[in-house]
Amino acid sequence: SAVISQKPSRDICQRGTSLTIQCQVDSQVTMMFWYRQQPGQSLTLIATANQGSEATYESGFVIDKFPISRPNLTFSTLTVSNMSPEDSSIYLCSVEVYREEPYEQYFGPGTRLTVT
Amino acid sequence: RKEVEQDPGPFNVPEGATVAFNCTYSNSASQSFFWYRQDCRKEPKLLMSVYSSGNEDGRFTAQLNRASQYISLLIRDSKLSDSATYLCAVIGSGNTGKLIFGQGTTLQVKP
């Protein structure tokens, strides 16, 4: 597997502000993803973070609200912009590890965001 | 209809019991299947990939039934430490890496 870290681990933010979450992996990976887990819910994919090009967003998620950067193969950021209480969630990054098929996906520890 | 469905439970079982969870998926072209375990306030951890021929890891056995479009997880000799939420996840066609998760099944093992 891969060792994945996220910063911050948690934050409490005021509505209308933005928060940038960082995800760092200890090895180069091709595929990185950002997920959201709302309280009491399962995980939903926000976007695929593509190195060297714009992220690929899932239905219901847009770049203006969740801009993503992927400057290299070990690092990505997700920004939650103009936050509202509905954005209170755990945000997790994940990476896909290639050993043999099926390619397995591992998650970072998550960032617990509370918007007041 | 959700793409991946699980019975949320909770499943309350005594220590030593055998318990099985099923997970159904709607996309017949789905390619890869996984079981994750998530403890309270923690990230999901990969428990097992599910192979076409089925696979076993200690007390855990995973099966795939493509004809009926479901995967299963069997836990034998349940331990208190098995108490957690078990999430099934599916990758659809195209090998995009996009994991679609079920809502999770909560297991509580009691002494």
Image (cartoon, rainbow, N blue to C red):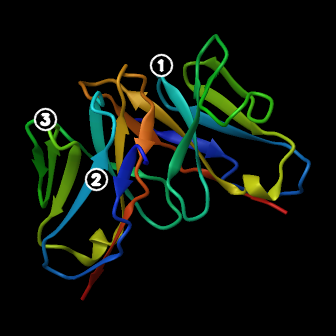
Callout 1: SS:
loop
3 vs 2, front mark: 2
Distance, label 3 to label 1, CA atoms, is: 26 Å
Q: Residue at x 17, y 44 (%)?
A: B68
The answer to whether mark 3 and mark 2 are in CB contact below 8 A is: no
Q: Residue furthest bottom?
A: B111
Q: Of residues A26 and B29, which is closer to you in this image?
A: B29
Question: Residue B97, relative to residue A110: is it above or below?
Answer: above
Where residue A14 appears, as percent x and y from the top left, is: 89, 57
What residue is pinned by disc 2?
B23
10 Å neighbourhood of mark 3: few (<14), some, or many (≥20)? some
Callout 3: SS:
loop
Q: Residue at x 18, y 73 (%)?
A: B78
What residue is pinned by disc 3?
B52
The circle on residue A30 is 1
Where residue B40 appears, as percent x and y from the top left, is: 48, 67
Where residue A59 appears, as percent x and y from the top left, is: 61, 33
Question: Residue A19, relative to residue A56: is it above or below?
Answer: below
